[in-house]
């Protein structure tokens, strides 16, 4: 079945440093979504990428979708303590698929 | 809209008891998903519905698990009998089919039910 691998599993950064998490799929994806889950909370949708090679920005967050639509990344510039949480990528396989397969997530800790 | 509403927030039950988790999706959303989250296995899709019809239940771990969606505004996930290994956080999520390729829309998750089976 489809697998979505995410690395690293954990990342500890000093406040102000940059952070990147990477996502790789064993199969070509139609779309990829990113979610953030705060400790004790629920996953909250951040963005969906659809096009090959797409790059989207949300303030300090930059999301990329690979040319082959099998990998993606999330980069946070100048982390803040409010960025703490687990970041998940989730892939959709077929063009009309509504089913998401989640990676295991990257847990980000920010040291003030 | 109040978002996806799940109840109860916490459930502690004894092994062998029946457990029912409830979910109210966002009004107008035509897809509903049940996920289970554990440290070991992460977020696993159990089952999903489209227009109240179950589409894929291949993630349901065993016959002890069942899910229903009697109408567009309500779904249940039942575990009977419950076992300690069922302890996890169970999330319900909903989405709208016309947003499938929209960059600004994804799943909306409920706050989850933390289930502990002792």
Image: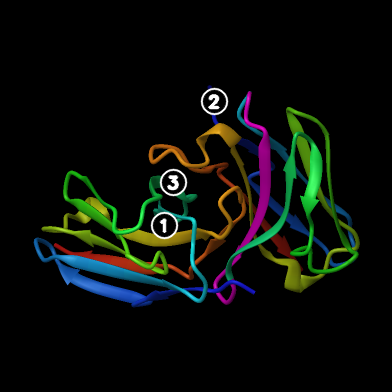
User: Which secondary structure lies at badge 1?
Assistant: loop
Is A19 on the left-hand or right-hand side of B116? Answer: left
Taking the image as drawn, is residue B20 in sight? Answer: no
Mark 2: few/some/many CA within 10 Å (<14, 14-19, 20+): few
Judging by the rendered image, the residue that carries numbered circle 2 is B2
Q: Which residues are magenta?
A: B28-41
Is B20 on the left-hand or right-hand side of B113? Answer: right
C-alpha distance separating marks 2 and 1:
21 Å
Instruction: State the scheme by which the image is colored.
Output: rainbow
Chain containing mark 3: A
> Is residue A109 or residue A29 the one in the foreground?
A29
C-alpha distance separating marks 1 and 3:
12 Å
- Please check whether the numbered discs 3 and 2 fall on a single chain: no
Mark 3: few/some/many CA within 10 Å (<14, 14-19, 20+): some
C-alpha distance separating marks 3 and 2:
15 Å
Asked whether the residues under the numbered discs 2 and 1 touch, taking CB atoms below 8 Å apart as contact, a structural biologist would say no
Residue drawn 60% across the image and 36% down it: B97
User: Which secondary structure lies at badge 2?
Assistant: loop
Judging by the rendered image, the residue that carries numbered circle 3 is A44
Residue drawn 63% across the image and 45% down it: B9
- Residue A39 is tagged as 1
Chain containing mark 2: B
Vertical placement of residue B110 versus A49, above or below: above
Q: Earlier in the sequence, mark 1 or mark 3?
A: 1
- Please identify the quarter of the rendering in which residue B18 is found: bottom right
- Please identify the quarter of the rendering in which residue A12 is found: bottom left
């Amino acid at each position: 079945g489809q697998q979505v691998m995410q690395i690293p599993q954990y990342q500890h950064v000093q406040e102000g440093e940059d952070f990147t998490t990477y996502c790789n799929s064993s199969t070509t994806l139609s779309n990829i979504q990113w979610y953030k889950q705060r400790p004790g909370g629920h996953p909250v949708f951040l963005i969906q990428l659809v096009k090959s090679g797409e790059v989207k920005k949300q303030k300090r967050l930059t999301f990329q979708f690979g040319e082959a639509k099998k990998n993606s990344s999330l980069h946070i510039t100048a982390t803040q303590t409010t960025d703490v949480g687990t970041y998940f990528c989730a892939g959709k396989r077929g063009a009309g698929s509504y089913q998401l397969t989640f990676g295991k997530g990257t847990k980000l800790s920010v040291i003030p | 809209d109040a978002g996806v509403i799940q109840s109860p927030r916490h459930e502690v039950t004894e092994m062998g008891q029946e457990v029912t988790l409830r979910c109210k999706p966002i009004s107008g959303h035509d897809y509903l998903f049940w996920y289970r989250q554990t440290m070991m296995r992460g977020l696993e899709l159990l089952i999903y519905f489209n227009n109240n019809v179950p589409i894929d239940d291949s993630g349901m771990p065993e016959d002890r698990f069942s899910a229903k969606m009697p109408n567009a505004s309500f779904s249940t996930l039942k575990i009977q009998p419950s076992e300690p290994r069922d302890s996890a956080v169970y999330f319900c999520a909903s989405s709208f089919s016309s947003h499938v390729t929209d960059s600004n829309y994804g799943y909306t998750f409920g706050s989850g039910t933390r289930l502990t089976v002792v």
